[in-house]
């Protein structure tokens, strides 16, 4: 292998890449904008729940329950209605997230030492959010019930509650942003490396310069190195920029080893660059390469555990996730950022990444050879 030939090809690739002014914002500004957008949008925290309130009791007890909801920072009563059809219309139009109905005998049953009912209506089309909103509402109702029992009865009343004392490690405030933002960093690295590497050979084919490279004394492996090294440097630079932005803007903790994070990123890039080169060898045009790239990106994303827990997937699909490099890198990057774990814990994921990357990258190199497809 000739280092001089590889160096000159790398220099040529950088010149060709930055010559097009359209590529500059894609390489520098786009990842930061994507992190900013995803960091605010991708969240499962329940905030600002809009409530449509229908009170048929209109008593002191029902007004106190209404005040308890309004006093909670999570809830906001936006509609007060009397007609059940109007309540249904508000929920159908998504003008409110929850509907709460107080029956006429609410206060009467409480004062008669009987169980009073409260109906909670939620839109189940988004099942996860609906269940979380109902759980938050039940927490407010439980607190209201406890205060009411203390006022009505002198002695302490117990009604089958569990005294749960929970301690959450690694993310004490349960901020979903701390969970998602490191994953977004990993996803942006994969997206950039796949897209640009998949275009590397295609651009030479469409420009008519691939023949000139074929007839040079350059070996196939040298050509592959010269095509991938620029994107390795660009991806690592983007990882640093995006990670620093996540630390400073979103205040995401970084408790682990920075060298371990760099090493894991390089091993991860072995897989993504290999897939990108494979796409280059099987595609004839840049449009075809772009479509093939997104064919890979969607399964990588869906089977990574980024949003959907892998444990909830069918057993055969869970097995397939082990072939997904993004799954292993997500485990590593979240472990480094949030838990501060080291190589002694993450080595199985690193070994899996190295094995997948080696097979994919060497397969792409072998397929490419030094010939025209």
Image: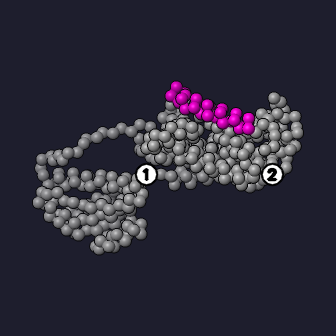
Where in the figure is residue 187, as x and y percent of width and height? 59, 45
Where in the figure is residue 43, as x and y percent of width and height? 47, 51
Q: Where's the N terminus, which quadrant?
A: top right
**Mark 2 vs mark 1, CA separation in Å:** 47 Å
112 and 63: which is toward the camera: 112
Mark 1 neighbour density, 10 Å: few (under 14) some (14–19) many (20 or more): few
Q: Is residue 70 above or below residue 291?
A: below
Point out the tag, 2 or 1, that comes first from the N-terminus: 1
Q: Residue at x 21, y 60 (%)?
A: 117
Choose mark 2 or mark 1, whichever is in front. Answer: 2
Q: Which of the colour schemes (rainbow, by chain, secondary structure, one colour) is used?
A: one colour
Mark 2 neighbour density, 10 Å: few (under 14) some (14–19) many (20 or more): few
Numbered tag placed on residue 206 in the rendering:
2
Q: Is residue 357 magenta?
A: yes
Where in the figure is residue 45, as x and y percent of width and height? 43, 51
- Stretch of the chain drawn in magenta: 342-367
Q: Are marks 2 and 1 in contact (CB under 8 Å)?
A: no
Which residue bears the numbered disc 1? 45
Q: Residue at x 63, y 44 (%)?
A: 189
As helix, strand or loop, the secondary structure at mark 2 comes to helix
Q: Is residue 161 magenta?
A: no
Where in the figure is residue 105, as x and y percent of width and height? 17, 66
Q: Residue at x 53, y 39 (%)?
A: 320
Q: Is residue 87 above or below residue 192?
A: below
């Amino acid at each position: 292998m000739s280092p001089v030939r590889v160096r000159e090809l790398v220099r040529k690739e950088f010149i060709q890449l930055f010559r097009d002014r359209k590529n500059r914002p894609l390489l520098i500004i786009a990842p930061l904008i994507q992190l900013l957008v995803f960091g605010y949008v991708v969240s499962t925290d329940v905030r600002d729940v809009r409530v449509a309130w229908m009170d048929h009791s209109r008593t002191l007890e029902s007004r106190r329950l209404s005040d308890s909801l309004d006093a909670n920072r999570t809830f906001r009563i936006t509609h007060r209605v009397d007609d059940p059809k109007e309540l249904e219309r508000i929920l159908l139009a998504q003008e409110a997230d929850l509907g709460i109905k107080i029956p006429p005998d609410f206060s009467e049953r409480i004062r008669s030492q009987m169980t009073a009912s409260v109906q909670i209506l939620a839109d189940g089309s988004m099942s996860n959010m609906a269940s979380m909103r109902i759980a938050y509402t039940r927490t407010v109702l439980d607190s209201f019930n406890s205060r009411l029992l203390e006022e009505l009865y002198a002695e302490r009343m117990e009604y089958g509650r569990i005294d749960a004392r929970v301690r959450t490690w690694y993310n004490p405030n349960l901020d979903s942003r701390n969970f998602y933002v490191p994953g977004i960093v990993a996803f942006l690295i994969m997206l950039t490396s796949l897209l640009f590497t998949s275009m590397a050979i295609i651009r030479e084919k469409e420009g008519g310069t691939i023949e000139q490279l074929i007839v040079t004394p350059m070996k196939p492996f040298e050509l592959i190195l010269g095509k991938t090294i620029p994107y390795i440097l660009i991806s690592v630079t983007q990882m640093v920029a995006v990670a620093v932005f996540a630390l400073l803007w979103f205040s995401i903790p970084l408790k682990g080893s920075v060298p371990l994070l760099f090493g894991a990123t390089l091993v991860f890039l072995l897989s993504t660059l290999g897939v990108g080169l494979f796409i280059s060898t099987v595609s004839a045009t840049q449009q075809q390469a772009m479509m093939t790239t997104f064919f890979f990106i969607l399964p990588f994303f869906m089977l990574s555990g980024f949003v959907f827990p892998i444990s909830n997937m069918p057993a055969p699909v869970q097995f397939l996730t082990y072939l997904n490099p993004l799954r292993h890198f997500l485990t590593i990057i979240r472990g480094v950022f949030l838990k501060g774990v080291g190589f002694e814990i993450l080595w199985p994921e690193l070994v899996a990444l190295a094995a997948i990357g080696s097979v994919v990258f060497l397969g792409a190199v072998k397929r490419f050879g030094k010939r025209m497809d």
